[in-house]
Image (cartoon, grey):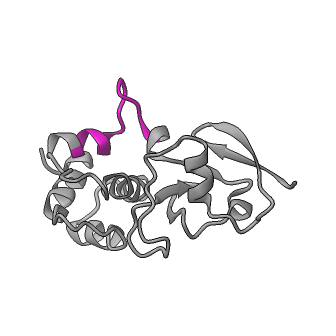
Amino acid sequence: MPRYDLRVNGSVQRVESSDADKPLLYVLRGLGLTATKFGCGLGQCGACTVLADGAAVQSCQMTVADAQGRTITTLEGLGSASKPHPIQTAFIEQQVPQCGYCTSGMIMSAAALLSKKQKPSEDDIRSALEVNLCRCGTHSRVVHAVMAASGQRG
């Protein structure tokens, strides 16, 4: 059976799969990384967003074969309870989550944006988070949280 060595959250994970087209989402959840959510399975909701080499990608659309050799970061690898990533802290302080379904994907998309642009505009934020669907309507709090994480609001 083919093996794939994936760098996930700083460590190498050896994954066996007879299906090179198996979605990375399924692999991550099989590794116990359940912060990455299954949403639509079509790359349209953003619930499964992870970072691949620092870029936000929908893990339901990336295959295990495509993930080989790339650095994958999930919400579990972004920060910790003792040392959260600034965007995680901002989401808590701004009381962003309601149902929490979109939260992981929103945080990962925001983290990718902040790694590229330290002081994004509101338009930059809205554009970067366009792929992330939130049915609770917390988008304005998300924008405020990203602005706070970038040091532009408190």
Horizontal arrangement in the rendering, residue 96 relative to residue 14 (left or right)? left
Comparing 37 with 11, the one in front is: 37
Q: Within the image, what quadrant is residue 124 found in?
A: bottom left
Horizontal arrangement in the rendering, residue 80 relative to residue 100 (left or right)? right
Comparing 150 with 142, the one in front is: 142
Q: Residue at x 20, y 60 (%)?
A: 143
Q: Residue at x 70, y 64 (%)?
A: 66
Q: Which quadrant of the figure contains the C terminus?
A: top left
Comparing 138 with 94, the one in front is: 138
Q: Tell whether position 111 is magenta.
A: no
Query: Where does residue 38 sit, x and y in percent of width and height?
Result: 45, 61
Q: Residue at x 35, y 56 (%)?
A: 110
Above or below, 99 relative to 140: above
Q: Within the image, what quadrant is residue 80 found in?
A: top left
Outermost residue toward the right in this view: 1
Q: How many marks?
A: 0
Query: Where does residue 37 sit, x and y in percent of width and height?
Result: 43, 56
Above or below, 66 relative to 34: below
Query: Where does residue 18 sit, x and y in percent of width and height?
Result: 81, 60
Where does the magenta region start and end?
A: 78-91
Horizontal arrangement in the rendering, residue 43 relative to residue 100 (left or right)? right
Horizontal arrangement in the rendering, residue 54 relative to residue 151 (left or right)? right
Query: Where does residue 68 sit, x and y in percent of width and height?
Result: 73, 56
Q: Which quadrant of the figure contains the N terminus?
A: bottom right
Above or below, 11 relative to 107: above
Q: Tell whether position 88 is magenta.
A: yes
